[in-house]
Amino acid sequence: MTYRIASIPGDGIGVDVVAEARQVLDRAASLYGFSFEWTEFDWSCERYLAAGAMMPADGIEQLRPHDAIFLGAVGFPGVPDHVSLWGLLIPIRRAFRQYVNLRPTRLLPGVVSPLAGRTADDLDIVIVRENSEGEYSQIGGRQSVGLPEEFAVQQAVFTRLGVTRVIRYAFELARTRGGRVCSATKSNGIIHSMPFWDEIFAEIAAEHGDVESEQSHVDALAARMVMRPDTLDIVVGSNLFGDILSDISAAIVGGLGTAPAANLNPEREFPSMFEPVHGSAPDIAGKGIANPVAQILTGAMMLDHLGEPAAARAVEAAVDKVLTAGVRTPDLGGSATTSELGSAVRDAVESGNAPDSAGK
Ligand code: NAI
Ligand code: MG
């Protein structure tokens, strides 16, 4: 089996971590009897500055035939963030109906949580973020630009279809892991869209009587994620709430360097896109010290989606083994480089996880 993957390294550290992760995935593939055909796209802020667009006009069409998209990060000083985001990531997420942004975080072995006394038993949270509508909408505008009466209007958009499908996804996911669902709301302050969200949440919860569920205002939930992360399992939230909460859930397990993510089209009508939570990290770009673990674990999520769970587990086990052995980048308190960590994970995939020893 050969999977056709569109690779978009993007900007900054995206380029370094994608290179490492691809090599890990190729190694896992050869051990588990499949292969990748990578097509690399140079879509980035560099391209924007040279050609005036993050991707070509037919970019979506070029991506369409692939089995998945593997993306690093986009965004770099010199190009406004809304240009890079709306010129590439958001169009792809919407054109391919990737309405679930799945962001699992767990405390990895050898990594110390910034929360005192918390262990891996306490920290295993999955954020299910709505990824196609909500607060990140194109509806709105600016008027009277430059005048004292200038104003900006930004409409949030919540549809029954959009809210229902992402909440349903969260409940179905809870069933697969015997988990609980907590909905992030703010229906005390946002009086139209959030009560609507809550009503739909209650409807879907009623359909899933076997799954424990609750809702919490997002501000209280942010505090709870820090104070009592052990009480949370799956958190479902709107585009904005999910975005913010997933940076917290990443921070409490040691930071953005280890947090993977996937933009999923669960119906598989279109390619899904796999990109870590972190951005292009301009502050450390070009230094060779970015942590490739988030991108590698994002690759494991892609393996799961492609139907290669044994290879996915082998990659995760290799990451655990290498971190346990103390090979860590500076963000985790170590001194390893991006490529040292990447090659250690490759070796661990090879040595510890051949199909007959850990092929589950
Ligand atoms: P960021 O995630 O790039 O960096 C935040 C902090 O975390 C920095 O101190 C950075 O050094 C550190 N960090 C992130 N990933 C790391 C890794 N793998 N290893 C070690 N340290 C890591 O977020 P920031 O600074 O807000 O954004 C930088 C650029 O990235 C902006 O242009 C932003 O728009 C873009 N961005 C793109 C995303 C994407 O492509 N999905 C997501 C988030 C931001
Ligand atoms: Mg974010």
Image: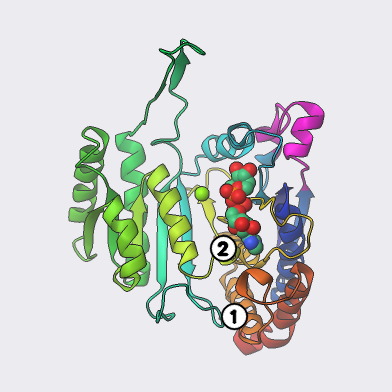
CA separation in Å, label 1 and label 2: 15 Å
**What residue do we see at 24% from left, 54% from top?**
216
Whether the residue under disc 1 has CB within 8 Å of ligand 1: no
42 drawn magenta:
yes
Quadrant (top left/top right/bottom left/bottom right) for the N terminus: bottom right
Q: Quadrant of residue 16?
A: bottom right
What x and y, as percent, mark residue 163? 32, 42
Left or right relative to 17: residue 191: left
Q: Visible in this render: residue 274? A: no
Residue 180 is tagged as none
Which residue is disc 1 drawn over? 320
In-front residue for pair 234/160: 234
**What residue do we see at 33% from left, 37% from top?**
161
In-front residue for pair 236/97: 236
Which amino acid, mark 2?
Answer: Met
Left or right relative to 258: residue 122: left
In-front residue for pair 174/242: 242
**Residue situated furthest right in the rendering:** 50
Q: Which residues are magenta?
A: 40-62
What x and y, as percent, mark residue 112? 51, 78
Which residue is disc 2 drawn over? 301
Q: Secondary structure at mark 1?
A: helix
Quadrant (top left/top right/bottom left/bottom right) for the C terminus: bottom right
348 drawn magenta:
no
Which amino acid, mark 1?
Answer: Asp
**What residue do we see at 41% from left, 50% from top?**
242
Q: Visible in this render: residue 343? A: yes
Answer few, some or many: residues within 10 Å of disc 2's Cα (few below 14, many 20 plus, some between 14 and 19).
many
Q: How many marks?
A: 2
